[in-house]
Amino acid sequence: MTEPIISPDTQREQRLPPGQVLTRKWPVLHAGSVPPFDPAKWEFRISGLVESEWSCTYDEFIVLPQVAVKADMHCVTRWSKLDNLWEGVSTRTVLGKVQVRPPAKFVMVHCAYGFTTNLPLADILGEDCLFAWKHNGQPLELDHGYPLRLVIPRLYAWKSAKFAGSN
């Protein structure tokens, strides 16, 4: 793995946005119980405005080329955690598995328990965006998105949808 990509947020002079409180912990903000994870049933799929759908298993996903991203995390609940090191697969690598059709402008991410989040295609294609399975050198904890978490550093943490694949 190469040197971490440094998110532009970590280069700002003022790293703590107005109204945010710095935390050393990573607060747990989880709705409901943590979904069970069975690697044999897990599937990652891209569909919609693409020429051909693409899907893979967990074992196929984790052998894709890996990246590391160092970025601050800010949450809409008004806390910030600085200097996070995320490791996983670049969103550009994943979306490179399909040919996105020209009308596509947004991405809908489907998560466990029917949760979804949407964001502009341009945001998910940022150089510092990834599907992470590690945080600060350790596998993600269950309460923080194990086995896979979408991380878009320049957006608030609520856009980092847990369980980007489906069980």
Image (cartoon, rainbow, N blue to C red):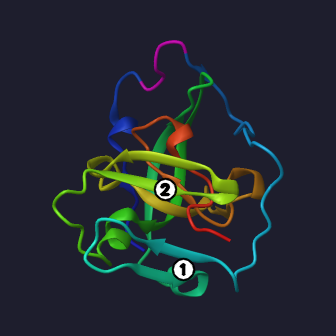
Q: Residue at x 49, y 34 (%)?
A: 156
Examine the rendered structure and indicate whether residue 155 appears above or below residue 1.
above
Q: Neighbour class for label 2 at 10 Å: few (<14), some, many (≥20)?
A: many
Q: Position of residue 94 (x, y in %)?
A: 38, 72
Amino acid type at mark 1: Ile
Main SS, magenta region, reads loop
Answer yes or no: do the residues labelled 2 and 1 have beta carbons within 8 Å? no
Residue 18 vs residue 121, the one in the foreground: 121
Q: Is disc 1 placed on a helix, strand or loop?
A: loop
Q: Residue at x 70, y 56 (%)?
A: 113
Q: Residue at x 44, y 60 (%)?
A: 130
Q: Position of residue 34 (x, y in %)?
A: 80, 56
Seen as rendered, the residue at the extreme left is 102
Q: Which residues are magenta?
A: 15-19
Q: Neighbour class for label 1 at 10 Å: few (<14), some, many (≥20)?
A: some
- Frontmost of labels 2 and 1 is 2
Q: Which residue is mark 1?
A: 62
Q: Which residue is mark 2?
A: 109
Q: Residue at x 49, y 39 (%)?
A: 72
Q: Quadrant of the C terminus?
A: bottom right
Q: Which mark is residue 152?
A: none
Mark 2 and mark 1 lie on one chain; the one further toward the N terminus is: 1
Q: Is disc 2 placed on a helix, strand or loop?
A: strand
Q: Is residue 16 magenta?
A: yes
Residue 74 vs residue 55, the one in the foreground: 55
Seen as rendered, the residue at the extreme top is 19
